Amino acid sequence: MIYLITNRKLIPDGNIFRVVEESVNAGIDAVILREKDLGYDELYSMAKKIKSITDKKNIPLIINNNLCVAKDLQCHGFHIGFNLINDSLPKFNGITGISVHSVKEAVAAQNLGADYILAGHIFSTDCKKDLKPRGLKFIEEIKKNIDIPVIAIGGITKYNIKSVYEAGANGTAIMSNIMKSNNILKTVKELQKIP
């Protein structure tokens, strides 16, 4: 299972709609729209266009951190960082995911009612240059403690994706590898080939 996480600033030509469409056509399983710098109006407009792309292939669109956009567009999912949760998950009629950075957060996310977690970062990545990666043991430890799906994130490529699944991950979340690709179909197909 491959989740595409967007970051339009990494796209060489800046065309997020092209990247999402090519990724959806290549067979990714979900899109997490993660454009943190956009306000409601800009994000709503972008999400509406992206939803028209994902809906054609019945691919879930998950909105990162903007609950109003997720609700107003009746998106499939809402995603939030663990650090942004108070005592309970926001009310949302769809799947809810939480980003976690420790086993304790993973257990708490499950107890809060999350449908899945994003766990990372697993390998070194440009997005988190100053932070040490948590490694494959992090996935193994989380899987021992929770039952909901664990989606691994951070520095995942065709060269290490097999080890991520072997550690117990239910899926992977990919940003840079797809956003920067000049052949998205090839990139996605290589990620889908688990040797």
Image (cartoon, helix red, strand yellow):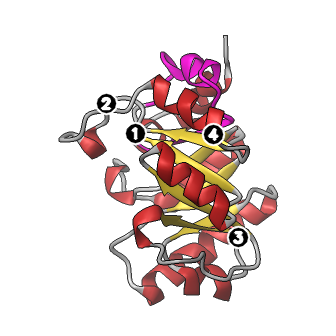
Cβ–Cβ below 8 Å for labels 3 and 1?
no
**What label sits on residue 121 in the rendered view?**
1
- Are discs 1 and 2 less than 8 Å apart at CB? yes
Say whether disc 4 or disc 3 marks the residue closer to the N-terminus. Answer: 3
Which of the two discs, 2 and 3, sits closer to the camera? 2
Q: Mark 3 against mark 1, which lies toward the viewer?
A: 1
Residue tagged 2? 124
Determine which residue is flagged by label 3.
52
Tell which tag, 2 or 4, sits nearer the viewer: 4
Which numbered dot is residue 145? 4
Question: Gap between marks 1 and 2, in whole Å?
Answer: 7 Å
Q: Mark 4 packing: few (<14 Cα in 10 Å), some, or many (20+)?
A: few
Residue at x 46%, y 63% (from the top left corner):
82
Q: Assess disc 2: are there few (<14), some (14-19) or many (≥20) residues with their C-alpha within 10 Å of its C-alpha.
A: some
- Residue 5 visible: no
Dot 1 lies on which element?
A: loop
Q: Amino acid at mark 2?
A: Ser
Boundaries of the magenta span: 156-176
Disc 4 residue type (three-letter):
Asn
